């Protein structure tokens, strides 16, 4: 995975936290993750398709998720409920959507977000890719964004269709 493919996601996280949550984030060093073992977090996952394929996973410890979603909706949460799950799904959707707009020369569509909670899961990356994980820290707590991304081989007709119908 090339560095220019992770930059839109890093920029998007910074913009979302600045504009929506009125805070900044500190960005850590990206690392390559070969194995993705389940950890007890809340993970928002969204797929990318079109002239590039990929998966974006926003990983938040429960405490961070409660604080971030609480700030988003203006409420205080003491436990994980449907509002937290929906909020994490919306947050990964916004981050991926903002990043999608930053890719030049690609026509990318987003899947609907899925939210996973707990530690009994395994996220598989696309074949011939690895997860690149970027840790972040904020006043709400630590979190990370993991991305696997690769340009797709598509015909010109498919490219025109993807750009006409991308959301």
Image: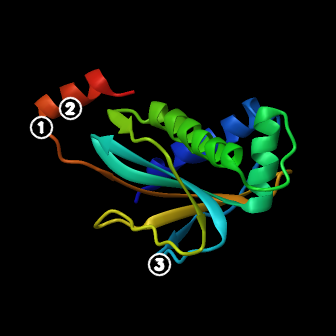
Considering the image in quadrants, where does the C terminus appear?
top left
Q: Residue at x 70, y 47 (%)?
A: 84
Whole-number angstrom distance, CA of label 1 to CA of label 2? 6 Å
Q: Between residue 137 and residue 86, name the one nearer to us.
A: 86
| Disc 2 residue crowd, few under 14, some 14–19, many 20+, Cα 10 Å | some
| Residue 74 in picture, x, y percent from top left | 84, 33
Give the residue furthest to the top. 164
Q: Between residue 45 and residue 117, name the one nearer to us.
A: 117
Tell me which label, 3 or 2, sits earlier in the chain: 3
The label shown at residue 159 is: 2
Please, what secondary structure does the residue beneath circle 2 have? helix
Whole-number angstrom distance, CA of label 3 to CA of label 2? 32 Å
The label shown at residue 67 is: none
Above or below, comparing residue 3 to residue 104 in the picture: below
| Disc 3 residue crowd, few under 14, some 14–19, many 20+, Cα 10 Å | few
Q: Residue at x 59, y 74 (%)?
A: 119
**In the picture, residue 17 is in which quadrant?**
top right
Give the residue furthest to the front. 81
Above or below, comparing residue 53 to residue 63 in the picture: above
75 lies left or right of 15:
right
**In the picture, residue 69 is in which quadrant?**
top right
**Does the rendering let one see residue 27?**
yes
Question: Contact, CB < 8 Å: mark 3 with mark 2?
Answer: no
Please, what secondary structure does the residue beneath circle 1 have? loop
| Residue 103 in picture, x, y percent from top left | 42, 36
**Does the rendering let one see residue 24?**
no
Tell me which label, 3 or 1, sits earlier in the chain: 3
Q: Which residue is mark 3?
A: 35
Considering the image in quadrants, where does the N terminus appear?
bottom left
Question: Contact, CB < 8 Å: mark 1 with mark 2?
Answer: yes
Please, what secondary structure does the residue beneath circle 3 have? loop
Q: Which residue is mark 1?
A: 155
């Amino acid at each position: 995975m090339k560095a220019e493919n992770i930059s839109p996601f890093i920029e998007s996280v910074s913009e979302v936290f600045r504009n929506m949550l009125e805070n900044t984030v500190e960005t850590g060093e990206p690392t390559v993750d070969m194995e993705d073992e389940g950890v007890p977090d809340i993970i928002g996952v969204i797929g990318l398709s079109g002239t590039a394929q990929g998966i974006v996973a926003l990983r938040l410890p429960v405490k961070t998720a409660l604080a971030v979603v609480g700030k988003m909706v203006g409420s205080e949460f003491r436990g994980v409920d449907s509002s937290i799950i929906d909020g994490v799904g919306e947050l990964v959707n916004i981050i991926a959507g903002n990043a999608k707009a930053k890719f030049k020369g690609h026509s990318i569509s987003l899947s609907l977000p899925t939210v996973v909670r707990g530690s009994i899961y395994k996220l598989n990356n696309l074949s011939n890719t690895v997860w690149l994980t970027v840790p972040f820290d904020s006043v709400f707590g630590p979190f990370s964004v993991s991305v696997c991304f690769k340009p797709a081989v598509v015909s010109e007709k498919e490219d025109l269709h993807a750009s006409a119908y991308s959301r």
